[in-house]
Image (cartoon, rainbow, N blue to C red):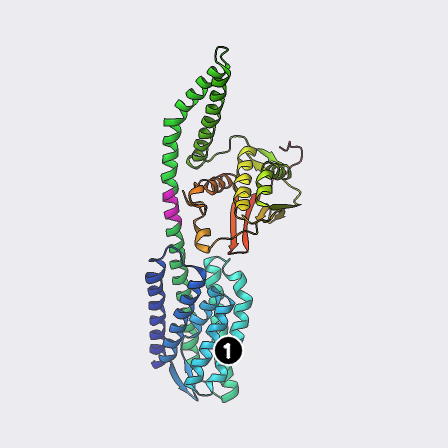
């Protein structure tokens, strides 16, 4: 009974720490930098380990039972290899201070657990909630079995009742702490998505208003300017001015069309597209900019299929991304464009060697009016990209490192190009 009470108190403090972390860190910070978050993560996990050891239950021969494995396991799975090693060394240091023969058992268990975490962690975060819960529950059960067998084999400690209590509480504790952590993590992500969605809704309503209120009179202005330019009685100077005015009016119309892309993203002309030609055409258009920025473009086409969508809008997506990548390399660099097929999708990977972005900047890409170009940027370019790619049932993935570069990958469903006209 004493063991059960001690372990349940262990569980209570671990759950309190999880809730405090969510309340103090996640809700007060929209996004925490990865480097800073690792320090928070290690501190919280270490605090949980210390409290678990302080509240441990002694069973003789220097052996103690507690739930230190729970923060160690979850810290390793969610924090990565460095966090796993750090937590393991910290746990061993604290356990060594407590003394007893159980230290060597702890050393063995931590080594085995660390290897297991290294093997599982690359795939763990990609799994569904119930798969994650099954993995951690099975992991903790194996840990409990080893923690019971080793003392029995080496020291003749065979308290089966204690093992049953410890094993059940450890598995249940790991299950519920993981479940709570995942629910809080999912809630936090959904809050960020909801905030971004609200901003997009505001822009959508604004775009619809602009299109109705401005587009019609702008069309009339362009029409009258064309009549003035075509009139034989208009002198050449006035015709030149009319031409300039028409160009600027068309540019304003293009900006309105960008807004409309957010308001009602739809494909007006769907057809199979030749990705190679689209990329090479964009390269030709941006050649003056690449020469000015001293940027070299390298292309590697490794796909055989085609994608479906509006070629004009797809062209706009490529131009926006290419232009951003080139402008991110003011001192020159290499822009690499690679295509390949994977998981029934065609991937277009655009990689630059520019100044890169911080994680908090990547998280805000696609938000209305968010730009890293200062006064030169409008924040519309990447919003256009996200909405058009979304309308083509595609996915945008961004990875970046400061002073190393940025990679943007567009993934689109594959369509059969046989007996179809490519554009």
Screen quadrant of the C terminus: top right
On the image, the x and y values in percent for residue 32 come to 40, 59
Residue 215, given in percent of the width and then of the height, sits at: 41, 26
The answer to whether residue 161 of the structure is visible from this angle is: no
Q: Which residues are magenta?
A: 193-199
Magenta: main secondary structure equals helix
In percent of width and height, residue 394 lies at 53, 43
Mark 1 packing: few (<14 Cα in 10 Å), some, or many (20+)? some
Residue located 46% across and 64% down the image: 78
Pick the residue in front: 170 or 56: 56
Looking at the picture, does residue 246 appear above or below residue 123? Answer: above
- Residue at the disc numbered 1: 109
Res. 262 image quadrant: top left
Q: Is residue 236 above or below residue 250?
A: above
Q: Residue at x 45, y 21 (%)?
A: 222
Circle 1 sits in a helix, a strand or a loop, which is it?
A: helix
The residue sitting at the top extreme is 233
At x 35%, y 68%, the residue is: 17
Q: Is residue 351 above or below residue 243?
A: below
């Amino acid at each position: 009974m004493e063991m059960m009470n001690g372990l349940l108190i262990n569980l209570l403090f671990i759950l309190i720490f999880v809730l405090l972390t969510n309340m103090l860190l996640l809700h007060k910070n929209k996004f925490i930098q990865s480097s800073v978050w690792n320090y928070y993560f290690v501190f919280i996990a270490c605090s949980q380990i210390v409290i678990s050891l302080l509240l441990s239950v002694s069973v003789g021969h220097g052996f103690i039972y507690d739930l230190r494995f729970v923060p160690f396991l979850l810290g390793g799975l969610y924090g990565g290899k460095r966090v796993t090693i750090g937590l393991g060394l910290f746990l061993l240091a604290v356990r060594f201070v407590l003394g007893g023969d159980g230290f060597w058992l702890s050393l063995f268990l931590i080594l085995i657990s660390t290897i297991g975490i290294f093997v599982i962690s690359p795939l763990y975060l990609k799994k569904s909630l119930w798969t994650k819960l099954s993995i951690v529950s099975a992991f903790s059960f194996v840990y409990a079995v080893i923690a019971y067998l080793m003392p029995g084999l080496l020291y003749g400690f065979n308290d089966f009742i204690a093992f049953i209590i410890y094993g059940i509480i450890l598995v249940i504790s790991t299950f519920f702490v993981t479940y709570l952590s995942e629910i809080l993590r999912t809630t936090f992500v959904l809050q960020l998505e909801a905030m971004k969605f609200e901003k997009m809704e505001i822009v959508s309503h604004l775009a619809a208003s602009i299109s109705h209120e401005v587009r019609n009179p702008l069309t009339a202005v362009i029409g009258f300017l064309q009549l003035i330019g075509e009139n034989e009685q208009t002198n050449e100077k006035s015709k030149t001015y009319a031409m300039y005015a028409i160009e600027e009016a068309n540019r304003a119309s293009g900006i309105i069309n960008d807004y409309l892309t957010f308001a009602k993203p739809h494909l007006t002309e769907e057809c199979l597209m030749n990705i190679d030609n689209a990329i090479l055409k964009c390269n030709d258009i941006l050649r003056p900019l690449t020469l000015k920025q001293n940027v070299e473009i390298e292309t590697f086409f490794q796909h055989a299929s085609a994608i479906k969508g509006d070629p004009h809008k797809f062209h706009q997506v490529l131009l926006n991304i290419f232009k951003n990548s080139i402008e991110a390399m003011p001192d020159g660099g290499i822009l690499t464009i690679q295509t390949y097929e994977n998981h029934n999708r065609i991937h277009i990977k655009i990689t630059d060697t520019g100044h890169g972005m911080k994680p908090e900047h990547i998280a805000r890409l696609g938000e209305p009016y968010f730009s890293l170009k200062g006064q030169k940027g409008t924040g519309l370019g990447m919003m256009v990209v996200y909405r058009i790619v979304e309308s083509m049932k595609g996915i945008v993935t961004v990875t970046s490192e400061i002073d190393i570069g940025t990679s943007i990958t567009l993934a689109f469903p594959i369509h059969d190009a046989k007996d179809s006209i490519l554009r």
